[in-house]
Image: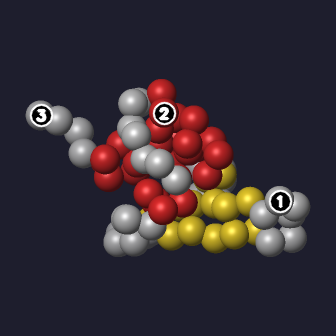
Amino acid sequence: METTESEILTEVIADCAKADGWANLAEIGVLLRKKNIVYGKLSKFILKFPDIIEIKIDELRQPPVTYARLKAT
């Protein structure tokens, strides 16, 4: 059985997440590339999964840093 993009993304976010559940998008991107997921612009790829993932942007940092976490099920 082939693993779907959403299943791989869920696994990667869980692997990168800190204690609060948020994972840095840069770290997520590294693991996705290692798993041969081609996504173009990562933030747009993540936005394709609004049912399972939420994002936040830390505008206080320069440059701003984007984070993602799995939504509670």
Question: In the image, what residue type sits under mark 2?
Answer: Arg
Q: Give the residue displayed 54% in from the left and 60% down from the top.
A: 43
Q: Mark 3: which secondary structure?
A: loop
- Which badge, 1 or 2, comes first in the chain's sequence? 2
Left or right: 14 with respect to 6? right
Where on the picture, by quarter, is residue 38?
top left
Front-most of 8 and 41? 41
Question: In the image, what residue type sits under mark 1?
Answer: Pro
Residue to which mark 2 is pinned: 33
Quarter placement of the C terminus? bottom left
Residue to which mark 1 is pinned: 63
- Measured as percent of width and height from the top left, residue 7 is found at 31, 47
> Distance between the Cα atoms at labels 1 and 2?
22 Å
> Distance between the Cα atoms at labels 3 and 2?
21 Å
Front-most of 67 and 38? 38
> Distance between the Cα atoms at labels 3 and 1?
40 Å
Q: Mark 1: which secondary structure?
A: loop
Q: Mark 2: which secondary structure?
A: helix
Q: Residues within 10 Å of mark 2 (few under 14, many from 20)?
A: few
Left or right: 32 with respect to 60? left
- Measured as percent of width and height from the top left, residue 60 is found at 86, 70
